[in-house]
C-alpha cells in the first residue's frame, strides 16, 4: 500500500484544516501541473511570497500523489504538522536542524520521499527572490539521483472578492546542475513566465482547489422564484 500524506486521525484533521483554509481564503487555486511524472525523490523549491504557500503546495503534492517532507521553522507552534510530513527546522537550534536534515536524507534514500523546501528560508514580500541557503546543496549532495523542481506561486487580488492563486511547475534540474544560484535563477525565471501566463494565457490553467466565489456569484437574487427587480 502506498504512502498517504495525511497519517491517522491527526493527519486527516490537519488535511481538512488546510483545505478549509484555502477554500475560505481564495476564489480558487489554479495550476499548470508538471508535463511529465516527477522523478522520486525530488526536491520541490517554490518562492516564498505568501502565508498560504505551504497550504497551496500541500494541495499540489497530494494531487500528484507525492509523499513529501516539509521543513517548518515554526513547527513547535503546531506539532500536528508531523502527521502530514512536517519536520522541525527551528532557526535558533542548529542541532535540531541537523537532525532533521539527516532524517530527511535517510527517508529520501530509503523510502523515496520527496522534499518541499522553501530555500529562501523566510516568508517575505514579492517580487524579490532571496538567496538560497546551503541546505539545498547538502541534500542534493547526499541523495543519489535526486532532481530539483522549481515551482512558482503567484497571488492576485483585483478582479474578484477574494485573491486567486496561480501555481506552475518548471523543468526539473539534474543534481549536478541544481546549485543554489542556478535553482534560484530558475525559480525567478519561472515566476516571470507565470506572470505572463496569468495575464495572457488563463486557458492553460487547471483548477487545483475550489475556493469561495464572489458574493454576486453566490447570491444572485434573480434566481429567487417570483423576485422581480423594480
Image (spheres, helix red, strand yellow):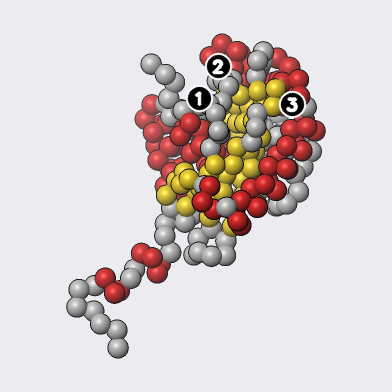
Please tell me which of labels 1 and 2 falls first in the chain.
Answer: 1
Q: Residue furthest left?
A: 226
Label 1, label 3: how many angstroms apart (C-alpha)? 21 Å
What residue is shown with label 3? Answer: 178
Q: Are marks 2 and 3 in contact (CB under 8 Å)?
A: no
Nearer to us in this view, 69 or 112: 112
Judged left or right of residue 34, residue 196 is right
Instruction: Judge depth for marks 1 and 3 and give the one in front.
Output: 3
Q: Say above or below: 22 vs 77.
A: below
Please tell me which of labels 2 and 3 falls first in the chain.
Answer: 2
What residue is shown with label 2? Answer: 112
Q: Residue furthest top?
A: 110
Residue 220, image x, y percentages: 33, 70
Q: Residues within 10 Å of mark 3 (few under 14, many from 20)?
A: many
Query: Residue sitting at 78 percent across and 27 percent down?
Result: 179
Residue 66, image x, y percentages: 50, 26
* Residue 143 is at least partly visible in this image: yes
Please tell me which of labels 1 and 3 falls first in the chain.
Answer: 1
Which mark, by number, is residue 67? 1
Label 2, label 3: how many angstroms apart (C-alpha)? 19 Å
Query: Residue sitting at 73 percent across and 43 percent down?
Result: 188
Query: Residue sitting at 54 percent across and 42 percent down?
Result: 32
Residue 169, image x, y percentages: 60, 37
Q: Quadrant of the N terminus?
A: top left
Residue 13, image x, y percentages: 39, 37
Label 1, label 2: how many angstroms apart (C-alpha)? 8 Å
Element on which disc 3 rests: loop
Q: Residues within 10 Å of mark 1 (few under 14, many from 20)?
A: many
Element on which disc 1 rests: loop
Query: Residue sitting at 40 percent across and 40 percent down?
Result: 16
Q: Quadrant of residue 121?
A: top right
Amino acid at each position: 500500500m502506498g504512502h498517504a500524506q495525511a497519517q491517522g486521525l491527526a493527519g486527516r484533521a490537519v488535511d481538512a484544516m488546510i483545505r478549509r483554509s484555502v477554500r475560505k481564503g481564495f476564489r480558487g487555486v489554479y495550476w499548470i501541473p508538471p508535463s511529465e511524472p516527477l522523478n522520486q525523490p525530488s526536491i520541490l523549491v517554490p518562492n516564498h511570497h505568501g502565508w498560504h504557500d505551504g497550504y497551496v503546495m500541500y494541495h499540489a503534492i497530494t494531487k500528484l500523489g507525492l509523499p513529501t517532507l516539509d521543513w517548518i521553522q515554526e513547527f513547535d507552534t503546531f506539532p500536528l504538522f508531523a502527521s502530514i510530513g512536517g519536520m522541525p527546522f527551528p532557526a535558533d537550534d542548529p542541532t535540531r536542524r541537523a537532525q532533521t536534515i539527516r532524517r530527511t536524507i535517510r527517508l529520501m534514500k530509503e523510502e523515496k520521499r520527496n522534499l518541499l523546501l522553501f530555500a529562501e528560508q523566510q516568508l517575505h514580500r514579492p517580487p524579490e527572490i532571496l538567496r538560497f541557503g546551503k541546505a539545498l546543496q547538502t541534500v542534493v549532495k547526499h541523495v543519489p539521483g535526486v532532481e530539483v523542481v522549481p515551482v512558482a506561486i503567484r497571488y492576485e487580488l483585483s478582479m474578484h472578492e477574494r485573491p486567486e492563486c496561480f501555481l506552475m511547475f518548471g523543468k526539473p534540474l539534474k543534481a549536478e546542475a541544481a546549485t543554489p544560484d542556478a535553482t534560484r535563477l530558475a525559480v525567478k525565471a519561472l515566476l516571470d513566465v507565470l506572470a505572463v501566463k496569468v495575464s495572457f494565457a488563463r486557458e492553460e490553467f487547471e483548477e487545483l482547489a475550489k475556493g469561495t466565489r464572489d458574493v454576486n456569484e453566490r447570491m444572485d437574487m434573480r434566481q429567487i422564484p417570483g423576485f422581480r427587480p423594480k
